[in-house]
Image (cartoon, helix red, strand yellow):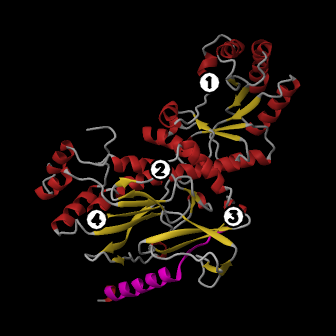
Amino acid sequence: MEENNLSMLCDFYEFTMSNGYLSNGFYKKNAYFDVFFRSVPDEGGFAISAGLEQVIKYIENLRFDDEHIEHLRSKNIFSDGFLSYLKTFRFTGDILAIPEGTPVFPNEPLMTVKAPIIEAQLIESFILLALNHQSLIATKANRIVRAAQGRTVWEFGTRRAQGTEGAIIGARAAYIGGCAGTSCTLSDMLYSIPTSGTMAHSWVQMFDTEYEAFKTYCELYPRNTTLLVDTYNTLKSGVPNAIRAFKEVLLPRGITTCAVRLDSGDISYLSKQTRKMLDDAGLHQCKIVASNALDEYLIKDLAMQNAQIDIFGVGERLITAKSDPVFGCVYKLVAIEDENGIIKPRIKVSESLTKIPNPHYKKAYRFYDKDSGIALADELCVYDETIDEGSPHTIFDPLSTWKTKTLTGFYTKELLVPIFKNGALVYSQPDIEQIRSYCMDQVGLLWDEVKRFENPQTYYVDLSQKLWDIKQQLLIEAQEIGRS
């Protein structure tokens, strides 16, 4: 079994349903599924889409080998016809998705899959896994980066990540969200993400004196020196020994760029005292790095206290999204195609209104102000609708049917772009630097009120009148079915 063939990374019921679809003759019928989420982690105003690259790789390698077939055969519940079908299985459908790095909002499709029902069903689990994980980490990273207010943030969470993929792919998502880089060397090798590291306390403890440890490190890495100063006593020995090593090793070589790292204690107080000591020694270009269980709230507090920190190293609370560790994307059937190619909307009804998805094969438009470029609202439409940019457009508040916003002087952009067409990749994938830059640009187009950490302004995500009417009619029909 090839390492990159993850076809069996699938919930078992996807196989049992697919076996049933084949036996009932549904296997050629096209189905439409939306991937969307219902709420933003940490009660934020928006999320960041990520994980599309891994979905693309998965689809391109999707096939079932003899080992897979024999494992399923051993369950003694699958028909020979279904197992034979899997032997030649390839994805032949269409996928549309919102590009990675885009700010996204609840209840709008991050991805739409149109494919024969078995193909669409079997890819559900991996798509959710990829988009849920990376969107979660990219969203958390972006919150932390925004809290840092222009200061550098590095992802340092490898050893606290939830498994190898959590560390490797998590570093990729954190970089998309705005981190300057990662401590994970393999993420650098695989995705060209900048890596950085300082030293551990064990380095200092291996030497007879703290100064000797610092001096040796400066001699080994004169152009990339960050000294960890809290092994014994930060202000009484750590910072003074670091200053001595910098002056005796680096300054004679004309090197003035260096750093010290604070990893314990009252970071705000220590950073201020450290800054004064460095400046008094003439080391004005020496930066101060802070680590130790940081997140956006602690970083925001440090900024309010005027802590003298230049760089933040953020680990476990970023790589695990500790404060709200589930993103919550779901994969719901929204339409089917009959034998004549007519698309028929479908809806799932729930007693919880928030769990009723928007039906039909859809487009998603984002409205931008023509003068400022600021994102104004999103609207979900039926696939055959278009937006007239020359006329005023009314958007409804998603939380109220009476509060509206009339937009004028706008332009629109379709959010969902083709990724696969008839099973063939048609999307030109940007590199990681382009995705990260795009993310920063797009977040910059959101109102500051939407970017608040506490009680952010709700961004408008409306349904077109046509889609709204279809949804209401389907709900009426579903009630009638439920009463029969």
- What residue lies at 62% left-to-right and 17% top-to-bottom? 205
- Which tag, 1 or 3, sits closer to the chain's start? 1
Residue 284 location, quadrant: top right
- Which tag, 4 or 1, sits closer to the chain's start? 4
Note whether residue 391 is visible.
yes
- What residue lies at 50% left-to-right and 35% top-to-bottom? 187
Q: Mark 4 points at which residue?
A: 117
Residue 230 location, quadrant: top right
Up the image or down, 142 lies above or below 27; here it is above
The percent coordinates of residue 107 (x first, y second) are: 50, 68
- Which tag, 2 or 4, sits closer to the chain's start? 4
Foreground label between 4 and 1: 4
Marks 4 and 1 sit apart, C-alpha to C-alpha, by 53 Å
Whether residues under marks 1 and 2 lie with C-beta atoms below 8 angstroms apart, the answer is: no
Q: Mark 3 points at which residue?
A: 374
Residue extending farthest to the front is 390
Closest to the observer, 332 or 111: 111
- What residue lies at 18% left-to-right and 43% top-to-bottom? 66
Q: Main secondary structure of the magenta part?
A: helix
* Mark 1 secondary-structure assignment: loop
* Mark 2 secondary-structure assignment: loop
